[in-house]
Amino acid sequence: MSDAGSGDGRGARRRGRDIPYNVPRRPEETTANTSSSCGSFAQDQGAGRGAVRVGGPSSERQTSDRDAGPSRVRTFVASRMDEVDRELVTRPAGFNKIGSRGTPLNVITNYFQLIKRPDMHLLQYRVDFTPEVDHPGVRKALVRVHEPTLGKYIFDGTLLYNTIRLTQPLELASRRNSDGSDVKITFKLVGEIQKEDAIYSTVMNLILRRCMAMLNLVLIKRNYYDKEAKTDVPGYPITIWPGYLTTIQHYEQDYLLKLDTISKFLRRDTAHDVMDKIRRRQADLTDYQSRVKGELLGKIVMTGYNNKTYRIDDVDFDKNAQSKFYLRKEDREITYEEYYRTRYQQRIRYPLQALLMCLPSRRDINRGNTEPIYLIAELCGMTGLTKEERLDFKLTKVVANLTGVTPDRRVATLMKFRRRLEGTPQIQQELRSWGLEFAKEPVPCKARILSTFPLMMGPTEIRVTNGDWGRNMQDKKMYASVNLNNWIVLHPRATTDKIRSFVKQIKTVGDPQGVHVSEPRYIALEGDRTTHYIDGLRDQVANGQYNIVLCVLRSHRNDTYNAIKRETLCKDASIISQVITEKNLNLDPGKLKSVATKVMIQMACKLGAEPWKLGKSPLDTKKFMVIGYDTYHDAANKKAVGAFVASINSSCTRYNSSVKIHSANEEISPSFRDHMLTALKAYYTANKQPPQSDLPLPQDIIIYRDGVGAGDIQTVLNVELQGIKDACREASTVFGKDYNPGISFVIVSKRVTTRFFVDKRDRQENPPCGTVVDNTVTLSERFDFFLVSQKVSQGTVSPINCNVIYNSSNLPPDFHQALAYALTHVYFNWAGTLRVPAPIQYAHKLAYLVGENIERVPHEDLAKYPYYL
């Protein structure tokens, strides 16, 4: 919860404030892939079946002849969504995206080549059921009895693919076993598919999913998990299910099967247990409902009766299990309690519990299901880890040991699963019947190791080894230091001796790095309540005489931390603040010195210090501006925070920041024009040197944008990139000279399931820092590459993917690859290489601070300082 002793450089994406020194990184944050999906539960936002919609379950919506036409069109469009995404070509025609710099390296991947694939003409049919049937398994069973009529087919629950043309219109009848009712099934031809069509890969993935089901694995969302191999975390109500990610797609030259191991974190408590725990703790029940919503909104739950996951969007305290809704199929009102008892054989123990509400996903809306879904809290198992669990040292250590997979173990697991597919006769029969065959060995790939970049600390050049230079900093001066003068310390009176001793340590470690630390003013607070800190800040720092304030908390308290940040960053008399906890003052001398060093560096950086800079780098060739953008989503309040940081000096070590809060909780920002114009004005102010004939603005602008889905790339081009262009045109008017810089826009994706391994002495290891891959497993329609920028000591390294979607600056592949790697060296909160370019991490820190802690825009006077570290 504190700012102290942070080392978040190895975080794939920091989901919290800088953690205290003796708390390890959460498993899902490290670049060593631990196969943990607790960080990816935010993806499980689409509501599955088996829930009750307003006005009746989704399964009860009748399909009439009148709405059959639009419904058919919607489904056909939705089914081709992936195809449309893949067909968005952002690679210039004839452009060679393969770089040449670096030392060649042979790697193997987690891909298997399709040596045979279906070679047949397929027909696509929309399948409708009257009355409507919601459960995919029941739908498939009702269709299966007509295989002699349909021929060989693949059915995903909505669309059916086969090789024979059916009579149109074709209506068949089946009898449902559960109640003996008759169901009419209508097959309508909606398309024909050739082998060359991109949607053919959808069919191959459906075939593969059918094969996965033959292994008795459990389907949760898009992936299959092995329930029989689950592991309970000792001492905690958490169960880990191992699973497999599989997907077939066309890459540079061939269709490849990507195979990876994953894990799902399932808690053994329910949403009702969470609500009941809050009720027992809450003496005053007037605030009970808001606390329940604060705890549950945005969380992902799983219903055990159908293994579907849902995202909670609201808690309806006006409804309970005895409330009624209209069941269209039976043309009557029914209680939720009766519905779940008769439909899923689930008996409700607490009929008066509030209901959970889930808004329809985009896929549901495409299917015509626009009403919210209601769930019974006691039937909804919680997933993921709570904030308290993420800060639990013992738990994170146990989880890391259980889910951490070394490269050789990962490869062995993948090969074992590949042999399992090959050794199951039923699966082989299915694959052969479709003409599908996979290679037995993983796909090899050509990689290159980029040269490391030297760093300048004061006048000294430092050579980086394995992406780490922490030991080199202790006796080296900063490249650009500041003095820590006119500062104040607010602390509880009980910590007086400890904080004075800690400040002495800060002084001791500051001198060798060129940071002179003067004696602060100490303000002893009579207590450690939030009001004590706020009153102290208002009494002591309102007149603006201090540069920075250090606040000491007795323990982790989010409310106090947030209040301090709001008070110091958002008022007219704003001041940079640093927060530490008393626990950091109770360490042994060796660890105390380490924490003091990190706190000193962090405070100095917040005031404008630059501990190091790149020596020789790609930035030396032109005047560049590098930009980072990230979005924080507040699910509970349905809003988003967009953070934009832009470099304002030639070494890209100083940044100007701006923040926008979007009430619509949108990922794509409509504010890029405003952000960009603010950044250009800041760059101009920082670099103008009259008299000057040239316009002091960057020649090239490179935007690193935190990853968005493939379906949003066109919107990014239309909205965010256009905003950059509009701002540059407006700058011509503002500054009185034509301004038309080169622009490169790079989407950086961290949720990457591609893996690379190096064979060494008959075992697999992680590739070294600076490994880049731009062939074989990249996409042919993109100018993209994979980058491994860190050395990890535990688990399998996870690369990032950089997708250059726009490149009017005409920067070559070698430049983009080298610059992305170089920028992983200049994040000042970690003395080592980051997983992502530094601008993205700075933007993430700012977005999280504003969205999670202060919930308002900081004062503009702080924009030139990295106060968010």
Image (cartoon, rainbow, N blue to C red):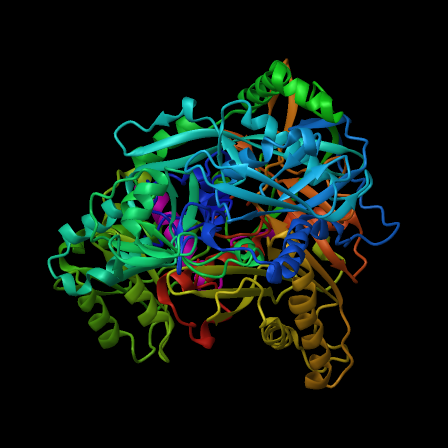
Residue 800 screen position, x and y as percent: 61, 43
Residue 616 screen position, x and y as percent: 70, 49
Looking at the image, residue 362 sits to the left or right of residue 179; the answer is right
Please name the residue shown 59% across and 76% down the image: 674
Residue 115 screen position, x and y as percent: 78, 24
Nearer to us in this view, 439 or 490: 439
The answer to whether residue 419 is seen in the rendering is yes
Nearer to us in this view, 749 or 311: 311
Looking at the image, residue 26 sits to the left or right of residue 563; the answer is right
Nearer to us in this view, 605 or 574: 574
Q: Is residue 30 above or below residue 51?
A: above
Nearer to us in this view, 479 or 135: 135
Q: Residue furthest right?
A: 94
Q: Which secondary structure class fits the magenta region best?
A: helix
Quadrant for residue 424, please give it.
top right
Quadrant for residue 546, please give it.
bottom left
If the image is split into quadrants, where does the C terminus sit? bottom left
Report the span colored magenta. Answer: 592-613
Residue 604: within the magenta? yes
The answer to whether residue 16 is seen in the rendering is no
Q: Is residue 767 above or below residue 516?
A: above
Q: Is residue 720 above or below residue 27?
A: below
Residue 799: within the magenta? no
Residue 285 screen position, x and y as percent: 14, 61
Please name the residue shown 50% across and 49% down the image: 131
Q: Is residue 829 above or below residue 668?
A: above
Image label count:
0
Looking at the image, residue 129 sits to the left or right of residue 205; the answer is left
